[in-house]
Amino acid sequence: MKTVRRLLYGEIIRAVLFVSLGFLALFLFFDMVDELQVLSRYGSQGYQLQHALLYIALKTPDHVYELLPISVLIGSIFVMARLAQSSEFTILRTGGLEPAMALSALLKLGLIFSALTFFFGDYAAPWAERQAHQIKAPFQGQLTVGQTGAWLREKQDQKQYAVNVRRFDGIALMQEVRIHEFNDKGQLLAITTARQAHIQSGRWLLGGVEEKSITEPASADKMRFKSVQLTQKNWPTEISADMVAAALLSPDRMGTWELFRYMRHLSVNNQNAQRYEIEFWRKIFYPLSCLVMLVLALPFAYLHFRSGQIAGHVFGGVLAGISFSLLNNVFSFVGNLQNWQPLLTSAAPALIYSAISLAAFWWMVLRR
C-alpha cells in the first residue's frame, strides 16, 4: 500500500502543481494588464514598474488560495483518467486495491491540500494583502467609504461608543476619527475628535485631539459642555485594525480568528453579524473542499476510456470545479439576503458535491 500511495500521491501532486502554475500564470497576466492602467494613472506620483511588479507578486498567495481546490479537482481527474486509460488502475485493483483503500488514500492526500489551502487563506494571503496595500497606499490614497466613512460600535462597562473613521491606510493609521460616548440610557456624554489615530494592542493612540464633554445642564432647555485640546490621548478599545478594515473592505480578506473576533464584537454590540458569520464558516469549509474534489475525481479511475476521451472528461472536471465555486458564491449571497443559518449556508455546497461524488463512486464501483 505504501508503494501505491507513493504512485498516486506523486502523480496527483505533479498534476496539481502543473495546473496551479497554469492558472496562476493566467491570473497574474490579468493582474499585469490591470496594473499597467494603474501605472499610467499614478505614474506622475512616483508609482513605477517595480512597484507594480511587487504588488502583483504579493497577489500570488490569494490566487493560490482561490485556485487550489479547482486545481486539485482538475489534476486528480486527469491522473485518474490517465491511470484508467493505461489500465494501471485496473492492475492496482487486481493486486488488491479495494475501493475503500483507494478512497482512504485520497482523503489522506486531501488533508494535506486542505492544510495548505488553510495556510494560504488564513496566513499567507492576509499578510501579503497588507504588504501589497502598504506599497500602493502612498500613491493611491487611503481607504474610505462614501462621504461619512466607516462606523463601528463598542460597549465598555456601562458606556457605549459610536466610532467614525473617515480614512484608513489599511495597516494601522487612521485619519479624521470621531468617538461618540453614550451612557447606558443612550444619552450623549462626550464627543472626541482626532486628526489621526494609530491602532495599537488594546488601545488607540489619538493625535490632535479635541474632547467635548457634556456637564450638568445650565437650565432645563440648555446644555453646558467643556472643550479640551490634547496633543495625544490613549483610548482603550478592542477594535483592531482588521475590524476597521472589515468595515471598509470585503470580509473575505480577513483571517479566521479576526473574523471570529469581529463577529463576536458585532454580536456583543447588538449589530447584525450575518454576513461575517457566513464568511467565517466559508473560511472553515473552503479548505475542506479539497477533500470533496478528490472524492469527486475518484470515480474517473473506474471508467473505461478509449484514446482521446481524457480531454473531454478533464473539461467536465473544469466545469464541475467552476460550478462548485459558483454555487459556493450563490449560497453565500442568497443566504445573506434570506437570513439563512450561516453554518448550513456555508456547508451546503460541500455537502451537495460530496453526496454527488459518493453517489457516483457507489454507482461505478458497486453497480458497474
Image (cartoon, rainbow, N blue to C red):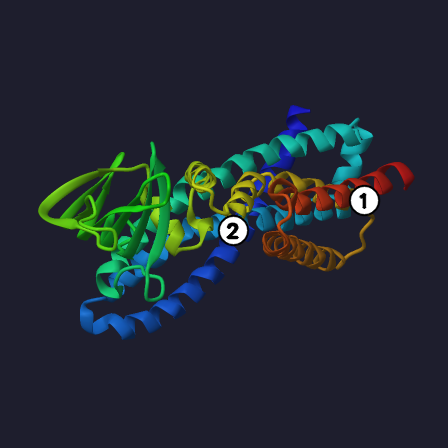
Structural crowding at the residue carrying mark 1, measured as other residues with C-alpha within 10 Å and reported as few (<14), some (14–19) or many (≥20): some
Q: Which residue is drawn at the image coordinates 59% and 37% (left, top)?
A: 10
Q: Amino acid at mark 2?
A: Glu
Position of residue 242 relative to residue 314, above or below, is: above
* Quarter of the figure with residue 302: top right
How far across and down, in percent of the image, does residue 67 sit?
Answer: 53, 51
Q: Amino acid at mark 1?
A: Ala
Q: Which residue is mark 2?
A: 66
Residue lying furthest top:
2
How far across and down, in percent of the image, does residue 83 sit?
Answer: 72, 43
> Spatial distance from mark 1 to mark 2, Cα to Cα?
26 Å
- Is disc 1 in contact with disc 2, using a CB cutoff of under 8 Å? no
Sequence-earlier tag: 1 or 2 = 2
Q: Which residue is drawn at the image coordinates 62% and 50% (left, top)?
A: 339
Q: Which residue is drawn at the image coordinates 42% and 45% (left, top)?
A: 254
Q: Is residue 366 left or right of residue 9?
A: right
Q: Which residue is mark 1?
A: 360
Q: Quadrant of the C terminus?
A: top right
Q: Is residue 231 left or right of residue 156?
A: left
Q: Is residue 196 left or right of residue 59?
A: left
Instruction: Mark yes or no: residue 84 visible.
Output: yes
**What element does badge 1 sit on?**
helix
Q: Which residue is drawn at the image coordinates 68% and 48% (left, top)?
A: 77
Q: Nearer the viewer, residue 191 or 218?
A: 218
Q: Quadrant of the N terminus?
A: top right
How far across and down, in percent of the image, does residue 364 sit?
Answer: 84, 42
